Image (cartoon, grey):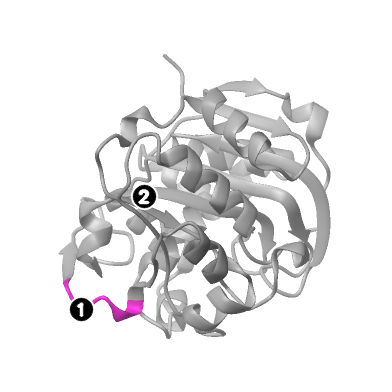
Amino acid sequence: MLPKVAILRGERAHETVERAVILSGGVDHLRNSPVLIKVNFICTETWDTGATTDPLLVEALIKIIREATDDIKVVESDANMTNADKASRATGMLEMCRRNDVPFVNLIKERERVKLRPPEPLALKSIEVPKIVAEGKIVDAAKLKTHSTTGVTLGMKNLFGLLPKKWKFRYHRKGISKVIVDICSVISPSLVVIDGFMGMEGQGPVGGKPVKMDLVIAGRALVETDIVATRVMGFDPGEIDHIRLALDRGLGGIEYDVVGNRVDEVSRKFEAP
């Protein structure tokens, strides 16, 4: 059976997120498991700029995932440009978490850590992550936006933020696309939900222009979901280095089943970075 990727155009509402997740296969595979919802906080800008994950989308995910488990955390780590705790407050994510009785965890503060070893490393022989990341199931709540270094930042790139290091420029020197693929070879999210209510084009991931897309893209297959989202943005997935390298490593494939809306119904040519 081909991996299923759901594309759903709809208003910015819980129902749109829920329908996309159900179309992608639902959440029964998360039953009775600890779940970490990994958001994108590259900065402290709010969701309407297209830079950060929309708290409304995450709140919808919490409500859906609670059908399978009560053990839910929203997570992010500090980045070069921002503090995750500060971003959680500025974006409204922390208030949403408190309203729903779900903890927000800055992964950089997690002291229990484990080392994961990519089977065929491109840049990193080992990857240190918090123990809760290694033991939990990841719901990858990514953004539909461009990136000045990697072309796009979607589900695969969002996993880069699981590394509990603030100064991540060191990884760029090793070849950021190779680092992303190494991470994806040892961490496979159980569900990818790409927030396309408001995307970003041009000089992403922070300095680009917001693009109102009214979309949610969801799937259980990481690489295939990113391929579909890249096509929605009007780019060739084969020209995105980390996607091409992931395909070369057998982490995904070019065949998948798109459900919901078709790519050509919702696609828009994003301005390249």
Residue 172, placed above or below residue 12: below
Give me the residue at 43% from left, 54% from top: 37
Overall secondary structure of the magenta section: loop
Q: Which quadrant would the C terminus be assigned to in this image?
A: bottom right
The amino acid type found where label 1 is placed reads: Arg
The residue depicted at 56 percent of the width and 43 percent of the height is 226
Q: Position of residue 198 (x, y in %)?
A: 75, 54
- In terms of secondary structure, where does tag 1 sit? loop
Task: Give the residue at mark 2.
Answer: 138
Q: Which mark is residue 131?
A: none
Task: Using the image, determine if residue 6 lies above or below residue 70.
Answer: above
Indicate the position of residue 149 as horizontal and vertical percent values.
Answer: 61, 68
Q: Amino acid at mark 2?
A: Ile
Q: Residues within 10 Å of mark 1 (few under 14, many from 20)?
A: few
Residue 189, given in percent of the width and then of the height, sits at 38, 45
Q: Which residue shows up at 58% across the image and 73% down it?
A: 42
Give the secondary structure at mark 2. Answer: strand
Mark 2 and mark 1 residues within 8 Å of each other at the beta carbon: no
User: 88 left or right of 264?
Assistant: left
Total numbered labels: 2
User: Mark 2 vs mark 1: which is more N-terminal?
Assistant: 1
Quadrant of the drawing holding the N terminus: top left
Q: Position of residue 196 (x, y in %)?
A: 70, 48
Magenta extent: 108-112
The residues bearing labels 2 and 1 have C-alpha atoms spaced at a distance of: 19 Å
Q: Seen in the image, is 100 located left or right of residue 126?
A: right
Q: Which residue does the image show at 64% across and 49% down from the upper left?
A: 195
Residue linked to disc 1:
111
- Say whether residue 111 is magenta: yes
For the residue carrying disc 2, how many other residues have a C-alpha within 10 Å: few (<14), some (14-19), or many (20+)? many
Furthest toward the top, the residue is: 1
217 w.r.t. 93: above or below: above
